[in-house]
Image (cartoon, rainbow, N blue to C red):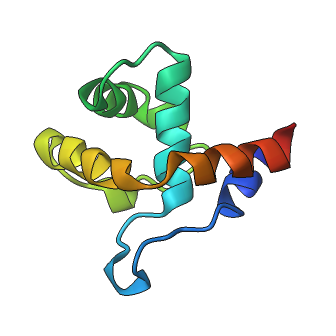
Amino acid sequence: MKILEKLDNIIDPRDEAKIDYPLSSIIFITLCAVLCKAESWKDVVLFGESKEEWLKNYIDLDVFGLNVTAQINLFKRLSFINLKLIDNAFKKEFC
């Protein structure tokens, strides 16, 4: 899927030694969830759970083997990522 290839081009600002989950997968889940009207991190996690079979066609979900609370915390922790960086990457790749 072309969008996943583009998401892989986004520079991950996290410390490589501390990365457990691919940034491209996290952004993909979040993007899909927001397009389906997710309004909170809890909504993003619930979307991911409810669409698990569909998402497995595109990304490896085995790395997300966490309970719901841990998943919500994961997405919240990553919200520090500079959204301007992601926005610029999207514009560069898709606009």
Left or right placement of residue 83 versus residue 88 in this view? left
Residue at horizontal 59 percent and vertical 47 percent from the top: 84
Residue at horizontal 84 percent and vertical 40 percent from the top: 94
x and y percentages locating residue 78 in the rendered image: 35, 54
* Front in this rendered view, residue 13 or 34: 13
Left or right placement of residue 65 versus residue 10 in this view? left
* Front in this rendered view, residue 11 or 7: 11
Q: Quadrant of residue 28?
A: top right
Determine the residue located farthest toward the right in the rendered image: 95
Residue at horizontal 60 percent and vertical 43 percent from the top: 57
Determine the residue located farthest toward the bottom in the rendered image: 17
Determine the residue located farthest toward the top in the rendered image: 37
Image quarter where the C terminus lies is top right
Left or right placement of residue 54 versus residue 80 in this view? right
x and y percentages locating residue 2 in the rendered image: 81, 47
* Front in this rendered view, residue 56 or 83: 83
Residue at horizontal 65 percent and vertical 43 percent from the top: 87
